[in-house]
């Protein structure tokens, strides 16, 4: 039996992340313990628990179902480590979000996407989540387009690349180039 907290604090490497993911596997009780650490522990534990948690949620989406509301609401907390936001939005791209949480998820992803201080990875993952939800709620497409148009000129190549894919997927008229 692995002590998850000790394992998380012992080593912050891909190998250790993979070992934790393998240990949790499809075991709900082990995943529940990881979620508890992710939501309730000190900064370093929360930050390091985020990586294996996202991999577990993607590999076994049924494990996250009972926690999804808490995970989405957790993104409201001010001062969250970037790893928490990045890994939470990463798995939100890959799972089915319950209908009752679509509005909260859209609001959160738009907030993250529009925040000039937010990391590019968090923004591009948010873009992808919004793109998925836009298929169900096409009325948000103009807001996505406007947001991407506003941000693209000042963003990284990774951001612009993902924005291009979102635009293509949603069949939005291409984003205007700066100065045109």
Image: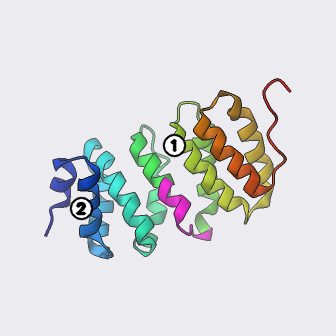
What mark, if any, has residue 19 been given in the picture?
Answer: 2
Assess whether residue 59 is covered by the magenta stretch: no
Q: Which residues are magenta?
A: 90-99
Return the x and y of residue 153 as percentages of the image width and height. 70, 29
Please give the name of the residue rendered at 82% of the width and 35% of the height, measured from the top-left corner: 176
Return the x and y of residue 142 as percentages of the image width and height. 80, 48
Tag 2, which secondary structure? Answer: helix
Among all residues in the image, which is located at the extreme top?
Answer: 179
Quadrant of the rendering where the C terminus is positioned: top right
Quadrant of the rendering where the N terminus is positioned: bottom left
Q: Is residue 76 above or below residue 30?
A: above
Q: Is residue 98 above or below residue 70?
A: below
Q: Is residue 101 above or below residue 6?
A: below
- Judging by the rendered image, the residue that carries numbered circle 1 is 121
Magenta residues, dominant SS class: helix
Q: Is residue 129 above or below residue 153?
A: below
Please give the name of the residue rendered at 73% of the width and 33% of the height, measured from the top-left corner: 150
Image quarter for residue 128? bottom right
Taking the image as drawn, is residue 174 in sight?
yes
Real-space CA distance between mark 2 and mark 1, rounded to the nearest whole angstrom: 24 Å
């Amino acid at each position: 039996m692995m002590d998850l907290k000790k394992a998380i604090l012992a080593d912050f490497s891909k190998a250790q992340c993979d070992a934790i993911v393998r240990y949790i596997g499809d075991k709900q009780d082990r995943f529940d313990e990881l979620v508890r650490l992710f939501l309730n522990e000190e900064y370093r534990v929360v930050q390091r628990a985020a990586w294996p948690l996202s991999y577990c949620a993607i590999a076994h989406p049924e494990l996250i179902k009972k926690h999804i509301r808490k995970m989405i609401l957790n993104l409201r907390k001010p001062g969250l480590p970037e790893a928490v936001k990045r890994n939470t939005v990463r798995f939100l791209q890959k799972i089915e979000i319950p209908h009752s949480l679509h509005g909260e998820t859209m609001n959160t992803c738009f907030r993250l996407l529009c925040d000039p201080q937010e990391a590019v990875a968090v923004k591009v993952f948010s873009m992808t989540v919004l793109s998925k939800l836009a298929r169900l709620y096409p009325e948000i497409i103009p807001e996505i387009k406007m947001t991407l148009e506003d941000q693209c000129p000042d963003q990284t190549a990774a951001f612009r690349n993902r924005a291009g894919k979102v635009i293509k997927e949603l069949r939005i008229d291409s984003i205007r180039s700066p100065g045109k």
